[in-house]
């Protein structure tokens, strides 16, 4: 009506000043009468008539009109008194896991710390009761005028509170507070099963100044602790938004996928009459990095160590490189494992695995050393065999003498050895000559005559050696053969069985199986015109036969090995190999087996870490 009466005032006869006043007076009327632009202001509804505050400022005015509000007093607990403890519910809305510091055992997260409590002094009429609001929403400094619980994080390392802070008050006096925080807490990390480890991040919330007689802290929708053991796990302590990480998988323990988010209950404990609410979530490591960068490379370099067993030991530089380089690289892998991990005494599956692979590589390198040592021994024994082969002419000479006289080699050795005589037997003794008397050598006086009558023992060449033109150097062949024969004739029977002959041949770098040795003995004896048993393992050799066999052993070795091929046992094959080749042959079979058993064993023992 006012707008209609104003609009009827004629503007033609009015002054300029009156025209401006009339225009300003009609502006609200024109605005109210203008149609609503749905594109600029969608979903508009008519403003209902209500009583009560319509804004935060009006709410504070209404609260002040009801009397003085003391925010230092905690609110009543449902019975209009201050006797009962105030119940505060807490919850963390997790939006991001920023960092997991494995060395320090710390977890940094982003999220919104939420809390709920009831303050009857803040109640107002809802829209259903004729009020204008169903919630008073305050942000920033506007929300600092009411009582708030003094919550803190018990395992806090650092806390950064952002400007984003929201508080809502509901008609029944319920209060909801949400505050954006970046939080770093101390949360022990057990790396025993690295890289297949799972962890639990814990955020402990409690009241700083009020014990359970004044305030009870519980998770959202959880139970109040009733004893020293608390209330157990209940409610919803953490709600997580979809999380993503290239290192960690979150929420695995809850049976959810990280990209869908998850919820976890909270643990309520009572310690020294204070409520402690532990908000926790689980996360596990994605093992691909350590598998690709540590486990698989260690297996590859174990393969490099294995290759050396197929390289000729004579190529020492190449073999040494294949033995040593994997050890150095495995050590580098071990250092890489501890680059981002605590250097403590905690047992870790991965560190034990790498240490074991290093140990296996070191064993492979030590095997190379053993092979080189065996080769040195084989060279010495090969030199003895070469000496026997050079003495072939001397050996035939000795055997011919034995056949002519019908004696044995031992008798020949005894008769052709130097004999002890006395000087007074009118034998010439040169001046300044040392003679053996069974005591330290003494020097004869220069003025002694050519034919001394002094009774002094000395050694001379035997008459038989002189007759056959045999030097004492020629007898060394028989003496060495005698030493070897007596050493392996364990039963002192004067006969050597195939197993004893096989062991004696090792001294001359000749390696045959027992069966091949028996076959060689049979061929030799038949060549000597003797009949042999069908079971050649029953054959034996006397000293003379053994010595003669040594003189021509090269003629039978190749044939004996060829005859023994075929259905040979593993033991026979090992006996027919030189120690250096035997070490390599065993390593070619044992090394892969050791690696396979080690890897399988570590994965089987993983649950025990």
Image: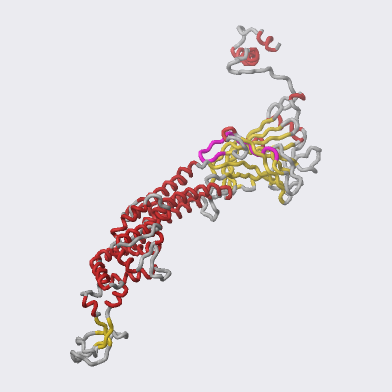
Which residue is nearer to you in this view: 589 or 538?
538
Q: Residue at x 74, y 38 (%)?
A: 69
Whole-percent x, y for residue 21 in the image: 62, 15
**On the picture, is 365 further left or further right than 249?**
left
Which residue is nearer to you in this view: 58 or 323?
323
Indicate whether 18 appears above or below 500.
above
Magenta segment: does it hold 236?
yes
Q: Across the whole image, how many numbered discs are drawn on residues?
A: 0
Which residue is nearer to you in this view: 421 or 376?
421
Q: Residue at x 41, y 48 (%)?
A: 303
**On the picture, is 457 further left or further right than 502?**
left
Whole-percent x, y for residue 81 in the image: 81, 40
Whole-percent x, y for residue 373 in the image: 36, 61
**On the picture, is 66 further left or further right than 164?**
right
Quadrant of the drawing holding the N terminus: top right
Whole-percent x, y for residue 156 in the image: 61, 47
Magenta segment: does it hold 187?
no
Residue range highlighted in magenta? 234-249
Q: Is residue 563 visible?
A: yes
Q: Is residue 150 visible?
A: no
Indicate whether 129 appears above or below 7.
below
């Amino acid at each position: 009506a006012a707008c209609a009466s104003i609009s009827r005032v004629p503007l033609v006869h009015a002054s300029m000043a009156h025209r401006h006043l009339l225009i300003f007076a009609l502006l609200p009327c024109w605005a109210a009468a203008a149609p609503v632009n749905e594109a600029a202001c969608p979903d508009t509804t008519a403003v209902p008539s209500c009583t009560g505050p319509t804004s935060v400022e009006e709410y504070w005015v209404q609260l002040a009109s009801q009397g003085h509000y003391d925010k230092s007093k905690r609110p009543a607990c449902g019975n209009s008194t201050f006797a009962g403890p105030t119940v505060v519910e807490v919850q963390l809305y997790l939006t991001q896991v920023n960092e997991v510091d494995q060395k320090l055992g710390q977890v940094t997260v982003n999220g919104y710390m939420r809390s709920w409590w009831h303050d009857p002094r803040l109640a107002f009429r809802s829209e259903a009761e004729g009020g204008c609001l169903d919630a008073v929403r305050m942000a920033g400094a506007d929300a600092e005028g009411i009582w708030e619980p003094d919550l803190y994080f018990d395992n806090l390392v650092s806390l950064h509170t952002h400007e984003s802070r929201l508080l809502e008050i509901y008609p029944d006096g319920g209060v909801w507070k949400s505050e954006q925080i970046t939080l770093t807490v101390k949360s022990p990390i057990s790396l025993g099963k690295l890289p297949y480890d799972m962890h639990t991040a814990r955020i402990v919330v409690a009241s700083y100044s009020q014990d359970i007689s004044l305030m009870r802290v519980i998770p959202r929708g959880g139970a109040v602790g009733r004893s020293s053991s608390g209330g157990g796990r209940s409610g919803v302590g953490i709600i997580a938004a979809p999380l993503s990480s290239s290192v960690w998988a979150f929420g695995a323990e809850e049976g959810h996928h990280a990209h869908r988010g998850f919820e976890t209950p909270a643990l309520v404990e009572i310690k020294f009459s204070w409520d402690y609410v532990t908000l926790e979530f689980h996360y596990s490591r994605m093992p691909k990095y350590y598998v690709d960068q540590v486990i698989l490379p260690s297996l590859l370099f174990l393969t490099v160590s294995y290759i050396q067993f197929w390289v000729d030991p004579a190529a020492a530089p190449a073999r040494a490189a294949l033995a040593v380089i994997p050890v150095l690289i495995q050590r580098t892998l071990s250092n890489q494992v501890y680059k981002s991990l605590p250097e403590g005494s905690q047992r870790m599956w991965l560190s034990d695995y790498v240490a074991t692979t290093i140990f296996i590589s070191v064993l492979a390198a030590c095997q190379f050393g053993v092979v080189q040592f065996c080769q040195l021994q084989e060279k010495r024994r090969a030199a003895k065999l070469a000496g026997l082969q050079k003495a072939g002419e001397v050996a035939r000479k000795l055997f011919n003498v034995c056949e002519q006289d019908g004696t044995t080699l031992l008798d020949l050795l005894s008769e052709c050895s130097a004999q002890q005589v006395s000087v007074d037997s009118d034998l010439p003794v040169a001046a300044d000559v040392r003679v053996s008397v069974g005591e330290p050598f003494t020097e004869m006086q220069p003025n002694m005559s050519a034919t001394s009558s002094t009774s002094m023992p000395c050694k001379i060449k035997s008459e038989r050696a002189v007759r056959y033109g045999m030097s004492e150097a020629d007898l060394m062949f028989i003496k060495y053969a005698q030493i070897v024969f007596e050493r392996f004739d364990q039963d002192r029977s004067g006969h050597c069985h195939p197993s004893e002959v096989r062991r004696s041949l090792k001294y001359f770098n000749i390696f045959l199986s027992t069966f091949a040795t028996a076959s060689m003995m049979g061929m030799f004896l038949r060549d000597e015109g003797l009949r042999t048993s069908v079971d050649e393992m029953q054959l034996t050799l006397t000293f003379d036969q053994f010595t003669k066999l040594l003189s021509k052993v090269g003629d039978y070795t190749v044939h004996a090995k060829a005859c023994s091929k075929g259905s040979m046992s593993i033991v026979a094959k090992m006996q027919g190999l030189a120690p250096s080749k035997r070490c390599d042959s065993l390593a070619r079979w044992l090394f892969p087996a050791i690696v396979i058993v080690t890897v399988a064993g570590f994965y089987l023992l993983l649950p025990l870490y």
